[in-house]
Amino acid sequence: MTSSTPTADIDARAPAGWRWAPFWVLAFVALWPAPGVAEGVMVLGALLAIAKLAMARFRGGVSLLSGPAWALTSVLFFAYWLPQLLSATDAVDQGRALRESLIDLRYLPFLWLVAIAVADERGRRLTLVGLAVIVAVWTVDALLEVVLGTSPLFAGIDGLKQLVSGRPMCTAEELASADRLSGVLGPCNLKLGVVLASLSPFALHAAGRRWALAGWLVAATAIGLVVLFAGSRASWLTYALVLLLSGWRLLGWQRLAGVFAFGALAVLVLAFLSPEVRQRVDRTTQVMAADQSGMDSALSGRSRIWGAALCMAGEHPVNGVGVRGFRDAFADCDPLPGKQPAWGEGPALHAHQLVLEVLSETGVLGLLLWLAGAALAWRAWRYADAASRDRARPAMQALVVTVFPLNTHLAFYSTFWGGLTLMLAALYAGSLLARRGD
């Protein structure tokens, strides 16, 4: 697979009627603090994209995306979606699994739209710089929350919500239980750390290009502070991978080692100053405990969840228990039935780890399809030229750290995290395999 198309003369500009694509992608991301609205924007964008393509009868497709970009974007979607469909045939909750797979078909035209948004120089510049600006604004807002005690952006969103509906964004119980910096997403959606960690390659790339080493260091420090205050330990690892992938080309190994040494020192200082950071550091040290209870406490109950996931994979090896069926199958596979779980009341909702989620919910068939998608994404990168790789580097880094298998994860078959991951995949495919003439 190469970065060029058989058509020699293709206009590098997006055809009229498609130049709004970058703004639609940016609106989708900027509205994540209001998940229902963001979902509506995504669905409407998908419908508009499929309507325009249908009216044009898909003619002139290579003027929107190169042939390889159409193929890779579609293949990555089906590597995600087909496991859902196959898992529905004998799922624990067959109706829900089938419904989820049918609903998620809406992602395919939206992914085409995302890939089209970055298929030419103008669209790519608007989209990638726009994502960097969103990350920067959310970072500054979170730092203001550290000083002021509340997020100005979330306060504005919450005030608007109360004005419109008479209800706040979060309940009193959610406000009281928030144990970390929440930022623009709010205390009832404590995902700011992991979201910023996954999107940070766009901000670091833009800062490095605009202000070279100094810009990269300032951006890395600011985002890193927010991730430490707002993130789980999984987001800390994700951000460390971002610094590794993004920094070594700009800094070299020696200076990058200095950056990591500074980061380790920052963790120690914040652990001393911040009770929330200290709690997560103390919990991590419990992994050294010899008994299983200490290990499970250090992992916030993850070892119990992972044991249940392995049980489900063993009992349903071919196509799993069905997408989003983990909670229904958990009781039968709980390795410690009757014991109070570390996460509180109720069953575990998902496996908290990509490989185990895919294995338990979609089985070996699902894992093979995911691996096939990863192999094709790697093959496209391997055979692309240097210019194509440079175009796609921020999206590649964001996608790699998000699906890095040696970490814990949010649910990839949930609406929010699944949508984020698929968007990154489309940004990668559209940037790497941009139209010829770009």
Image: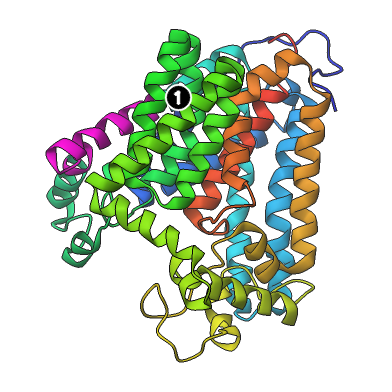
The segment highlighted magenta reads 133-155
Asked if one can make out residue 185 in the rendered structure from this viewpoint, the answer is no
Task: List x then y, in percent, for residue 436.
Answer: 75, 13
Say above or below: 321 vs 122. Answer: below
Q: Main secondary structure of the magenta part?
A: helix
| Residue labelled with disc 1 | 203
Give the residue displayed 56% in from the left and 25% down from the top.
246
Drawn side of residue 383 relative to residue 236, left or right = right
Asked where in the image residue 251 lies, by quadrant, the reply is: top right
Q: Taking 9 as reference, is 222 above or below it?
A: below
**Percent from the top left, x then y, of residue 211?**
43, 9
Q: Quadrant of the C terminus?
A: top right
Say whether residue 8 is left or right of residue 366. Answer: right
Q: Residue 236 lies in magenta, yes or no?
A: no
- Residue 71 horizontal/vertical position (percent): 78, 36
Element marked by disc 1: helix
What residue sits 45% from the left and 24% below the top? 203
Residue shown at the point (24%, 48%) measured from the top left: 274
Q: Amino acid at mark 1?
A: Ala
* The one of 415 and 376 positioned closer to us in this rendering: 376
Q: Residues within 10 Å of mark 1 (few under 14, many from 20)?
A: many
